[in-house]
Image (cartoon, rainbow, N blue to C red):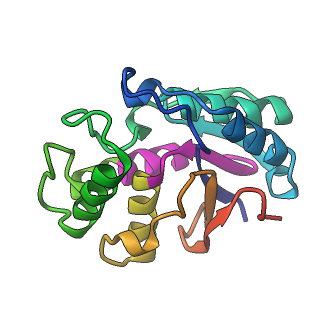
């Protein structure tokens, strides 16, 4: 059975002067991705699809290079739209993210509503999966929309309790045909 791996980009270089979608990987994030790019779980990956945000593209390229594959860019796989606030210091960001998940039908501080971000990510992932693959698919994206995708697949309400641990660079997997979740978030280095 083909598996879909949803991977979030690892640590980024935070620069409040640059729009968040343009942030790239930090040296730690790059090293984590490089260390995992040839892990056993990647061996059947024959298709890599990525958000077009820089940090996701850089992550996807590391995995694609290790597998001799190209990356399929997908603009609609972007993180939840937070452009209304731009960069927020960590305490403000965490409080806003908590509210984003707690009140999915409300725009928090002008952010895209969680329910809308979930509809978008589910639609684009299912569109990607409607194109058959002979092996596993790796989708490289972002934590919030990844969590929204997972809650949909698990058929549970939107909640931050299923959010990935801090730092990014986590992966969950689901069956490409049945969409049943195989495992929830795992650190990309700990997955075998």
Residue 50 is covered by the magenta coloring: no
- Say which of 13 and 142 sits in front: 13
Name which residue lies at 31% across and 70% down: 158
Q: Quadrant of residue 78?
A: top left
Left of 8 or right of it: where is 186? right
Left of 97 or right of it: where is 84? left
Give the quarter of the figure containing the N terminus.
bottom right
Residue 136 is covered by the magenta coloring: yes
Q: Is residue 119 visible?
A: no
Q: Quadrant of residue 190?
A: bottom right
Tell me residue 135's x, y (percent): 75, 50
87 is higher (above) or lower (below) than 37: above
Tell me residue 164's x, y (percent): 52, 63
**Which residue range is magenta in the image?**
121-143
Tell me residue 11's x, y (percent): 60, 43
Give the quarter of the figure containing the C terminus.
bottom right
Name which residue lies at 28% across and 39% down: 81
- Say which of 15 and 186 sits in front: 15
């Amino acid at each position: 059975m083909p598996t879909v791996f949803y991977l979030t980009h690892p640590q980024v270089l935070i620069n409040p002067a640059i729009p968040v979608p343009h942030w790239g990987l930090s040296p730690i994030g790059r090293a984590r991705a490089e260390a995992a790019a040839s892990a056993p779980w990647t061996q059947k990956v024959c298709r890599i699809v990525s958000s077009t945000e820089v940090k996701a593209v850089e992550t996807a390229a590391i995995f694609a290079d290790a597998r001799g594959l190209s990356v399929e860019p997908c603009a609609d796989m972007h993180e939840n739209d937070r452009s209304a606030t731009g960069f927020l210091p960590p305490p403000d960001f965490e409080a806003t993210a908590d509210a984003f998940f707690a009140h999915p039908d409300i725009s928090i501080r002008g952010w895209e509503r969680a329910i809308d971000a979930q509809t978008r990510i589910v639609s684009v992932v299912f569109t990607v999966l409607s194109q058959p693959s002979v092996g596993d698919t790796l989708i490289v994206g972002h934590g919030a929309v990844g969590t929204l995708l997972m809650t949909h697949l698990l058929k549970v309400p939107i909640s931050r309790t299923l959010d990935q641990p801090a730092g990014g660079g986590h992966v969950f997997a689901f069956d490409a045909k049945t969409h049943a979740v195989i495992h929830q978030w795992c650190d990309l280095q700990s997955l075998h």
